Image: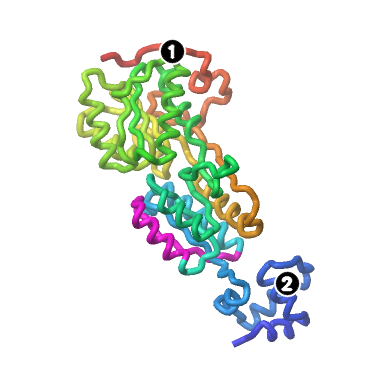
Amino acid sequence: MATMADVARSAGVSVATVSHVLNGTRPVLPHTRQAVLDAVEELGYTTNTLARSLVTARTRSIGLAVSVIGNPYFTEILQGVEAAALEAGHSLLIADPHDDPEHERKVVRLLHERRVDGLIVAPSAHPSGLLAYLSRHRVPAVLLDRLADAPGTEGGPRFDQVCADNAEPMSRLVTHLAGLGHRRIGLVAGLPGLSTTSERIMGYRSGLAFAGLPYDERLLVHGDSESAGAERATAALLSLGAPPTALVTGNNAMTIGALRALRSHGVPVPDGMALCCFDDFPWADLFSPRLTAVAQPGRDIGARAVRVLLERLREPDRPARTVRLPCTFVHRTSCGCSDASGKPPADPAADPASNPSEKGPRRDRRRR
């Protein structure tokens, strides 16, 4: 088996130079770098990761703990994490906490015991045990998608956090529906306790206020971030004496549950119920009608989380920060608009969906 010394002799450089090329620890002239890589390829040299980790106290591995890995949104995040980690020369260990606080602590502990250099975690609705473990063991960590970290002694977060913007995009969905004439707009919200749920509820209420519509607590139901819960919650809305004429769902899984409930109750979309959803997904454009949605930048969120974690490893004492990435409004037809070819209005100032000065609906498309 070839050694690093063999690579150095073949390339005509020092062992230290080979190390710098393979580990990225110091800039190397392009022709020298290429000579080392050619020698590595020719000799079939592979790095002894275990031996290197004993010397450097680093394994060049990252632990990722995210629930519902089968969810298309988290799949996109996983793809972003994997690509960014691989580009940085890090391997990835993955575990599913199942949104259960006890299981969450267990899988995080197991990943930590594997001596990963740092962790990326999408916390559960009750993450106090997780945060206590990370703090107690001083684990470099980035909280992903869901904010869970209370301010520290200096008033900022204790852990780095990367997520999408939640309130403003949800507000835009609501004001878009209000601009189409709807006065009773329901929300199927996610699992209580998650920051994504509370922030999207905040956006829902601010959207109603921008449109000059009153908040009716009966129109806000919880689908607990999963399909079956959303199906039950949507059925409850349909049973009201004055049900909503438009509906917003809080994530992609709940969109599926809401559609099931609407179909089983014989309510067509959008003629019987206008529908907008938070979370776009690959087949949303294949539904009939095509789903108007907010698209989160899942891959970018995953990749940014890796970069933030690597920055933390390089600068362990820098202040923690929260990074928010913008979402995209994907305008289709389930909201009741004519076919918009997936393009949002070109001028937001002229679009009632984003103009708070246009108070109230222009027309009531469906009264009950």
Crowd rating for badge 2 (residues with CA inside 10 Å; few <14, some 14–19, many 20+): some
Kind of residue at badge 1: Gly
Q: Nearer the viewer, residue 342 or 122?
A: 122
**98 magenta-colored:** yes
Say what amino acid the circle numbered 2 marks: Gln
Residue 173 picture location, percent across and down: 44, 27
Q: Residue at point 42% right, 20% down?
A: 208
Q: Residue at x 25, y 37 (%)?
A: 231
Q: Is 257 drawn above or below residue 221 in the view shown?
A: below
Element under disc 1 = loop
Say if the magenta span includes residue 30: no
Residue bounds of the magenta highlight: 89-112
- Check whether the beta carbons of the residues at disc 2 and disc 1 lie within 8 A of each other: no
Q: Which mark is residue 94?
A: none
Question: Which numbered disc, 2 or 1, marks the residue closer to the eye?
Answer: 1
The N terminus: image quadrant:
bottom right
Q: Residue at x 51, y 37 (%)?
A: 165
- Give the residue number, with chain letter if any, for mark 2: 34
Q: Nearer the viewer, residue 175 or 286?
A: 175
Coloring basis for residues: rainbow
The one nearer the camera, 355 or 126, is 126
Tag 2's secondary structure? helix
Q: Is residue 253 above or below residue 49?
A: above
Q: Position of residue 39 (x, y in %)?
A: 69, 80
Q: Can you identify the residue that label 1 sits on? A: 360
Q: Earlier in the sequence, mark 2 or mark 1?
A: 2
Image coordinates of residue 174 in percent, x first then y, are 42, 24
- Please tell me how crowded label 1 is: few (under 14), some (14-19), or many (20+) other residues with Cα within 10 Å: many
Can you see residue 342? no
Q: Residue at x 27, y 32 (%)?
A: 234
